[in-house]
Amino acid sequence: MKRKEIWRRYRIDVIALIIFGLVTSFTTIIYEVFLAGTSPEQWLGIRVLYNILRFAGAYLLGDLIEKIRAKLAPKGGFIRKALADACALSLYQLPIYFISALIMQVSLKSMIITAGLYILDNIFLGWVYGYTRDQVKLFFLKKVLKRQAKC
């Protein structure tokens, strides 16, 4: 794959992750601090590490979503795509969360509670990421087609 194509795919996933992060950022405070018992300092440390790792590997998330959608939703359909997006988000984000939480010395009990809540969050809100990613992808595709039509 060419460098330009990799950059295009990475850009799509980073933009979708930023928008998805804005939508779900307030729930992470509730999950981790109030429900799971993580201290505010630990929460902040987790968020910094988590976001660095999450954005660095955004391309991998996009690749994972494409592969899971191909298996679970080959013909499309909102429910199947939403389920595929939730699975991909959980498979991608949970290991990053666990690494960040371990570095910040969060208790195992808090990590398990938070992981369970993240899975539920991804089930109910994962479609937002998938929809956003599809719209960003469509936006850039239209720009490329428009540029090609001018040539």
Image: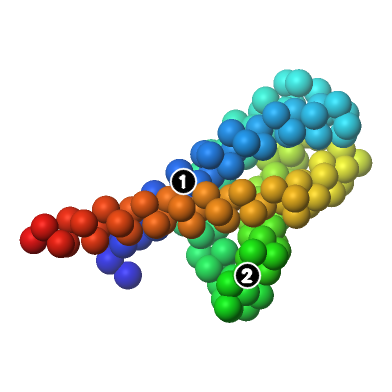
**Left or right of 39 in this view: 81:** left
The residue closer to the viewer here, 97 or 64, is 64
Q: CA distance from mark 1 to mark 2?
A: 24 Å
Say if residue 35 shows up in the picture.
yes
Q: Is residue 8 above or below residue 48?
A: below
The residue where tag 2 is placed is: 77
**Left or right of 143 in this view: 98:** right
**Secondary element at tag 2:** loop
Q: Which dot, 1 or 2, sits closer to the camera? A: 2
Q: Identify the image quadrant of residue 127.
A: bottom right
Residue occupying the point 33% across, 53% down? 140
Identity, as a three-letter code, of the amino acid under mark 1: Val
Label number found at residue 44 = none
**Secondary element at tag 1:** helix
The residue where tag 1 is placed is: 14
Say if residue 94 shows up in the picture.
no
The residue closer to the viewer here, 42 or 60, is 60
Dot 2 alpha-carbon crowd within 10 angstroms: few under 14, some 14 to 19, many 20 or more: few
Residue occupying the point 86% across, 26% down? 34
Dot 1 alpha-carbon crowd within 10 angstroms: few under 14, some 14 to 19, many 20 or more: many
Q: How is the image coloured?
A: rainbow
Identity, as a three-letter code, of the amino acid under mark 2: Gly
Q: Identify the image quadrant of residue 23.
A: top right
